[in-house]
Image (cartoon, coloured by chain):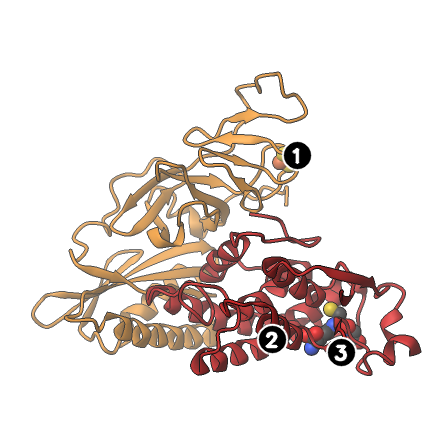
Chain colours: A orange, B red
């Protein structure tokens, strides 16, 4: 748990990008979401005001996962020895063994850049070059789909998404950036968008966005698209 | 008083304790030295449950084995509001379905934990693979339940015994080497279970 592995070269290529790490709905109030960014484990949580924190999932004291800790509103408390870390900075604000001392300023959780837009949470390990291109031009009225975790590198997943025909949202697929595939109707209107999260070197998570269907049919469409994505997952995993 | 043959580290025995707490039922716990004593295989215990398994519940002349059966009984008998086991045919059918599913989680995730923690001789890779297959099914179910406005396994607004029965071995899965990282909808649901008023823990399960 304490071993710190340096980033795999295949993942390092994405270091300066904003990468989708969760849906907004994956991190409800009070929840400690266990995520991943380019191989690193994440603890993702909201403070009382709803501000999102994307932290390394590792207590600076003894390396215990912060996601098994307690959400205290504006602080996160480690399960093991009760050290507390502040929203925003990740700085240590309380050490139960020394209740009357202010913890040294150098003690803090590693914090990642985070951004919440269009129903998704994005993070970056290093200074990102620009806003995530994949955020731009999301269909105004869209529905998130159930994400799928695939045991395959992001590159393989992107190529497979490009080739796969997704009923009931057919159209022409185009890869608009290394981690985004957009499907457009013959009329040019976007019907589907896939955002790929390279969570480790050989595991990727695919998040989907479906243009709103008229009426209340979106849940059925989401179910069909989920089945379609899961079957793609089996195909990909059988090949890798 | 209602008696429960119990072992503190058993997830199946644990299923009974939170429901009893939610319903305000006091239980007399009769400890069974499951590990390393194997007291559940003694002649004395086999006379109580010929299957040699815990938990067993005794209420007056009634003796019940199987955690799911015990949940059904306690909720039907002692929950005046009938929210934990609603007397609505479709909901009862769904609850029965997920109680059977809880047994599948026991057979896979609990078996993996017995292998890792108590040296049971099981095919560990197979236990883990089947546990993941079960978790995948539940995660998908819960995702679409949430999308349709339902917070619980078999119901919209109030948890039922199906939630209680599925919870323990999912929450203990890491003790059998089964990560829940890939199941975000399950993780949100386990948070909701922990948030039920009066929730109690067992060793290996932290409060919220
Ligand atoms: N179907 C039973 C299974 C109970 C069960 O597997 N109990 C374990 C302890 S957690 C046990 O007694 N195992 C001993 C054995 O099966 O030999 C239930 O749900 O209560
Ligand atoms: S490991 Fe977190 S407080 Fe000690």
| Nearer-the-camera pick, B67 or A198 | B67
Same chain assignment for discs 2 and 3: yes
Same chain assignment for discs 1 and 3: no
The residue where tag 2 is placed is: B72
| Nearer-the-camera pick, A36 or B186 | B186
Badge 1 density bin: few <14, some 14–19, many ≥20, Cα 10 Å: some
Badge 2 density bin: few <14, some 14–19, many ≥20, Cα 10 Å: some
The residue where tag 1 is placed is: A81
* CA separation in Å, label 2 and label 3: 13 Å
At x 57%, y 42%, the residue is: A69
Is residue A229 placed above or below A9 in the rendered structure?
Answer: below
Ligand 2 contact, mark 1 (Cβ < 8 Å): yes
Is residue B155 placed above or below B184 in the rendered structure?
Answer: below
Q: Which dot, 1 or 2, sits closer to the camera?
A: 2
Say whether marks 1 and 2 touch (CB < 8 Å): no
Q: Quadrant of the N terminus of chain B?
A: bottom right
Q: Secondary structure at mark 1?
A: loop
Ligand 1 contact, mark 3 (Cβ < 8 Å): no
Is residue A176 placed above or below B67 in the rendered structure?
Answer: above
- Whole-percent x and y of residue A49? 35, 36
- Residue B137 placement, left or right of B59: left
Residue furthest toward the right?
B43
């Amino acid at each position: 748990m304490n071993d710190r592995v340096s980033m795999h070269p295949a993942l390092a290529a994405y270091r300066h990008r904003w990468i989708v790490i969760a849906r907004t709905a994956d991190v409800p109030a009070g929840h400690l979401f266990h995520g991943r960014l380019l191989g690193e484990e994440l603890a993702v949580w909201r403070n009382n005001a709803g501000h999102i924190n994307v932290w390394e999932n590792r207590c600076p004291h003894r390396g215990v996962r912060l996601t098994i800790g307690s959400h205290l509103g504006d602080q996160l408390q480690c399960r093991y020895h009760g050290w507390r870390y502040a929203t925003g900075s990740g700085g240590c604000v309380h050490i139960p063994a020394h209740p009357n001392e202010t913890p040294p300023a150098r003690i803090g959780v590693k914090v990642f850049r985070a951004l919440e837009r269009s129903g998704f949470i994005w993070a970056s390990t290093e200074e990102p070059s620009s806003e995530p291109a994949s955020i731009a031009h999301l269909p105004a009225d869209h529905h998130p789909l159930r994400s799928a975790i695939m045991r395959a590198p992001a590159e393989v997943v992107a190529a497979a998404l490009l080739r796969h025909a997704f009923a009931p949202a057919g159209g022409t697929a185009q890869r608009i950036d290394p981690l985004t595939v957009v499907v457009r109707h013959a009329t040019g209107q976007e019907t589907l968008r896939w955002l790929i999260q390279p969570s480790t070197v050989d595991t990727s998570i695919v998040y989907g966005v479906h243009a709103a269907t008229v009426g209340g049919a979106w849940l059925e469409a989401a179910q069909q698209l989920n089945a379609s994505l899961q079957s793609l997952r089996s195909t990909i995993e059988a090949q890798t | 008083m209602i008696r429960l043959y119990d072992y503190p580290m058993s997830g199946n025995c644990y299923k009974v304790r939170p429901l009893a707490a939610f319903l305000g039922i006091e239980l007399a716990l009769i400890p069974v030295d499951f590990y390393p004593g194997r007291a559940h295989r003694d002649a004395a215990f086999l006379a109580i449950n010929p299957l040699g398994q815990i938990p067993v519940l005794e209420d007056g002349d009634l003796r019940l084995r199987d955690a799911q059966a015990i949940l059904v009984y306690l909720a039907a008998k002692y929950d005046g509001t009938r929210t934990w086991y609603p007397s609505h045919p479709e909901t009862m059918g769904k609850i029965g379905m997920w109680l059977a599913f809880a047994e599948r989680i026991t057979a896979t995730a609990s078996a993996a934990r017995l292998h890792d923690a108590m040296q049971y001789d099981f095919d560990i890779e197979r236990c883990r693979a089947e546990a993941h297959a079960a978790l995948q099914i539940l995660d998908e179910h819960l995702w679409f339940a949430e999308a349709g406005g339902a917070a619980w396994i078999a119901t919209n607004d109030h948890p039922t015994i199906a939630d209680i029965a599925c919870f323990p071995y999912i929450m203990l899965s890491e003790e059998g080497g089964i990560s829940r990282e890939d199941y975000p909808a399950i993780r949100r649901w386990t948070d909701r279970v922990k948030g039920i008023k009066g929730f109690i823990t067992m060793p290996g399960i932290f409060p919220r």
